[in-house]
Image (cartoon, rainbow, N blue to C red):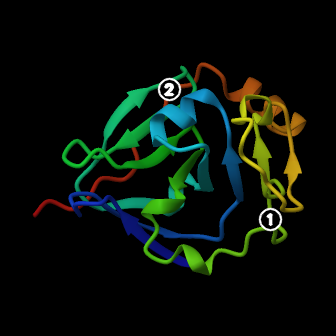
Amino acid sequence: MHWTGGCLCGALRYEVEAEPLWICHCHCDMCKKHSGAAFMTYIGFPKAAFRWTRGSPKLYDSSGDAKRGFCATCGSSVTFHRVHETSLALGGLDHPERLEVGAQRPVYADNHIFIGEQVPWLKIDDALDRYEGLPPAREDEMAVLAGREIAPCAAAPQE
């Protein structure tokens, strides 16, 4: 599948050629602060399938194994980078309605994570799996990848 998106002001644009690996609604305190919302929805893709087509984000090393990307002009939360994958903030996709939430995924089932940090007034009635932290297999994956350098994604062409 072909996905495109970017930030609010248009200074950042990207494209991805891949099926989503997973969709996750993260309720952790860092994602709430990064998004300014009750939770953050990310769509994971293989890093090699992602490239910037305009600009490049300001990166914030939020936890040692992840860098959060945002637009230095408008402040939009855009990406979440790990060693092996690039996750996109749902709000930055040009056509988020194309996502099939709850569909069979090649890596992890769509889910809610860090629900122990969920704001108490938020009521969720979907059938997605819920985890107090990361799904167990994801915790194992992150342990293997811990400490590896997160290289930048493919840069946008020079204008």
Q: Foreground residue, 32 or 42?
A: 32
Q: Is residue 151 visible?
A: no
Q: Secondary structure at mark 1?
A: loop
Query: Label 2: which residue?
Result: 149
Residue 76 picture location, percent across and down? 34, 49
* Quarter of the figure with the C terminus: bottom left
Quarter of the rendering containing residue 69: top left
**What's under tag 2, amino acid-wise?**
Glu
**What's under tag 1, amino acid-wise?**
Arg
Residue 126 picture location, percent across and down? 84, 62
Residue 148 picture location, percent across and down? 57, 24
Residue 105 in the image: above or below residue 69: below
Q: Foreground residue, 145 or 30?
A: 30
Q: Secondary structure at mark 2?
A: loop
Total marks shown come to: 2
Q: Identify the mark at residue 105; answer none if there is no mark.
A: 1
Q: Who comes first in sequence, dot 1 or dot 2?
A: 1
Residue at the location (75% across, 34% down)?
114
Are the residues at dot 1 and dot 2 in contact (C-beta closer than 8 Å)? no
Q: Is residue 69 left or right of residue 126?
A: left
Q: Calculate the distance from the C-alpha at mark 1 to the C-alpha at mark 2.
A: 27 Å
Residue 67 picture location, percent across and down? 47, 33
Q: Badge 1: few (under 14), some or many (20 or more) residues near its Cα, within 10 Å?
A: some
Residue at the location (89% across, 51% down)?
129
Q: Is residue 51 visible?
A: yes
Q: Is residue 94 left or right of residue 104?
A: left
* Quarter of the figure with the N terminus: bottom right
